[in-house]
Amino acid sequence: MAPWRSVGLKLPERWIAIAGVTVLSAIALAGFALAIYAAWLFHDMPDATDLVDYRPPTATRAYAWDGTLIGEFSRERRIYVPYDNIPPHLVQAFLAAEDRNFFSHGGVDALGLTRAMMKNVANAANGRRLEGGSTITQQVAKNVLLTSEATVGRKLKEAILAGRLEQTLNKEQILELYLNEIWLGYRSYGVGAAAYNYFGKSISDLTLAESAYLAALPKGPDNYHPLRRKAQAIVRRNWVIDQMADLGWVSRADAEAAKREDLKVQKAPTRAKYRDADFFVEEVRRRGLATMGQRLNEGGYYMRTTLDPRLQTAARVALMNGLEKYDRRHGWRGAWGHVDKAEGWEAVAKQESPPSERRGWRAALITDVSGGNVRVRLAGDGGAGAIVSQDVAWARAGKGLRSGDLVFVEPVEGGASFRLKQIPAVNGALVAIEPYSGRVLAMVGGYSFSLSNFNRATQAMRQPGSAFKPIVYAAALENGYTPSSVVMDSAITLRGAGGQDWTPENYNRRYYGALTLRRGLELSRNAMTVRLAQGVGMSRISDLAVKMGVVKKMDKVLAMALGAGETTPFRLTAAYAAFVNGGRRVEPHLIELVQDRNGETIFRGDKRDCPRCNAAFNGDESPRVAPDGDQVMDPITAYQITSMLQGVVQRGTATSALVLNRPVGGKTGTTNEYRSAWFVGFTPQVVAGVFVGFDDNRSLGEGETGTTAAVPIFVEFMQDAAKPWPKTEFKAPANAKFATVRGIREAFRPGTEPKVIQAPLDSGLSGPQPYSQVWPDGKLTTPAPAAPAAPQKKDDMTGLY
């Protein structure tokens, strides 16, 4: 008997039963599989509640002391703007372009999705881009919580998360996230950064046309690039404007006016309008990273720096001018390029760019050289003219000019002639510091940041030469000497390393005999300084140099007294602040204050405590804040050095600074073989250090001393920087005693001032005489005659002056 007959089923019925079981089993398996897929798909579903306190990474913005924006630090260039600060027409432009039903749907717009699918039929037939139909809520879910993978699973997650977002956040919060998170091209995340990068303005200043252009970008910023694809960008922008008009959000008249506007943007995104502080901003970034780590690039901090834009611009201009003047003194080095045929020369010229800081310089081709007449044609606009005669003569004295040479020129105002320009091979630095607080007011680390971002102010270790001598003299004053103490300036030979004799030379190879400390520092006498260092002891000098922050460690050898150790312009300039502020070491700092997005201060450059500053005023004496910095020398010592360094300007190696016509002091420095030239100078308001030298530390050339190469840069800087400052005198300590010595009013510690006595008959002197030095036997001693100059022996330790 057949099996089916045993259960009483006919053949067709049995097949139906089997088919039914199969279908049910398939459905069960499909359901089970779907359940497994759903479990796998949603096992790591993000939690929409995470967005309640979410803020996307935003740029830390750095400001100068006066509020000027000088830089931004970020991984994603974004300026977070709260919803209440976003103009209504900007919001409406994005809604018109992306999600017109945003305020009425619950996260997924079924009507909008259906409309998009219907349009896609026509779009596909005509080869146009397909519309996605995603709502703004879905885009937030995708951009913030999900990846951008184009899969069914991701779309399902997106739809579910969109619904959850609508339950967690209100519509304004979702829009705020969207408008601050979205990528809009031009290195811009969010509408705040896009407004600055595209148009150089705040979102509150955007026009209707500009807002509509930004709203056109989410579908593909590269497709609507404002420079490369301007026509397509305008078409898309005008479509957005029409959508706004159709929805009644703008009048038709305003829409038509906006559509007639041209699309004008910045040629490239810029971090800030102020561009003179690149070296300073980069140093701030490095120090910020060292202090805050990667939070700097994503925390959206407000950072107030110590920069004074007026002084920074003056510093950049002075340094660039000074280095160019040095470069011109050393001749024309020749064209930077040459072409044999005029055709295609502009393409070659584009390979070399002038420094971005010299906006007037232009690349040019020398077209004709005949006698004293040299003609050039400019790259780009084809302008032409002649090089001025004095520059032709300058070039002839160097490597000359010939047709086909590629050079840089600068138009002479009011004529069709040009100055010949070349980028200096030499480099340098200028640092300006407020001496009482340590605020770094200006910093220029080289000729041009666009050509080299190596910061010679903070990174170049160089010998300071005689610019170190004030530390030697300060150590002497701290240990029993006075400004009127006498030390011999005569030849001295010492046993050096390896048994070699060392004979430190004076710059002019002459010796002046017995000199007061003041006069020795004013004239920068090497031999005398070495004798003084012997008397004081190099341990004391080394200890003071470390305390003042010139170096972290110093060898206790006499060559260091002449500046043979290495330091940076930043360190040395900061050390000089102690002479002006009464003997305190201040820590130079560039970052004054950092606050988070809630306005909470997370860093202060001023570390001083003010115990009663936050207390309510009750009529008592106001709080007193202690001066900043450790006391590294007696205030009288600091004032004595300040006075002696004023003498350097009045009678010594920096008399060219007298043109400033105000109280100013400072010290020149030049190292072996003229490798580095220095001047660190100061007024009561600022200390400024100038360094000039080649990056490979080769010689600057015969006669290129601190007096010649560095002082003029300081003078140009101060002539501009000091204009608004009063001509105040340096303030002496209240307990200082004063006496006139050799016609100069000197400061002394109480009890060390000179005593007036009657000169002995056998002294060769007549009348009352001041003690210039308290000698061990208590007798008045006349200066010894200068010793005859010994034969000089040059080695690598001589010639520091």
Image: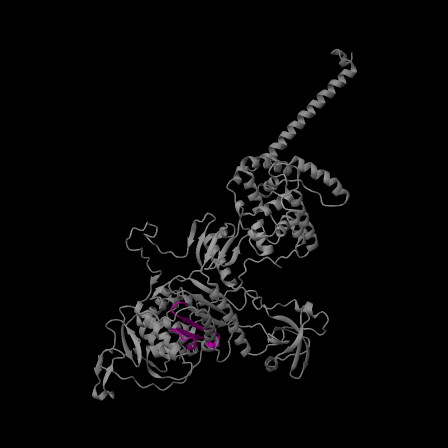
Residue 445, horizontal then vertical, whole percent? 50, 66
Q: State which quarter of the image contains the N terminus.
A: top right
Residue 776, horizontal then vertical, whole percent? 23, 77
Q: Can I make out residue 63 in this image? A: yes
In the image, 472 versus 342, the foreground residue is 342
Write the residue at 71% across / 69% down: 344
Colour style of the rendered protein structure:
one colour
Vertical position of residue 658 compared to residue 597: above or below: below
Which stretch appears magenta? 658-686
Q: Is residue 117 magenta?
A: no
Write the residue at 50% across / 60% down: 281
Write the residue at 34% across / 52% down: 613
Q: Can I make out residue 524 in this image? A: no
Judged left or right of residue 290, residue 780 is: left
Q: State which quarter of the image contains the C terminus.
A: bottom left
Judged left or right of residue 125, residue 574 is: left
Vertical position of residue 601 compared to residue 140: above or below: below
In the image, 556 versus 308, the foreground residue is 308
Residue 374, horizontal then vertical, whole percent? 65, 79
Q: How many marks?
A: 0
Q: Quadrant of residue 584?
A: bottom left
Residue 116, horizontal then vertical, whole percent? 70, 39
Q: Is residue 674 magenta?
A: yes
Q: Quadrant of residue 645?
A: bottom left
Write the residue at 60% across / 52% down: 207
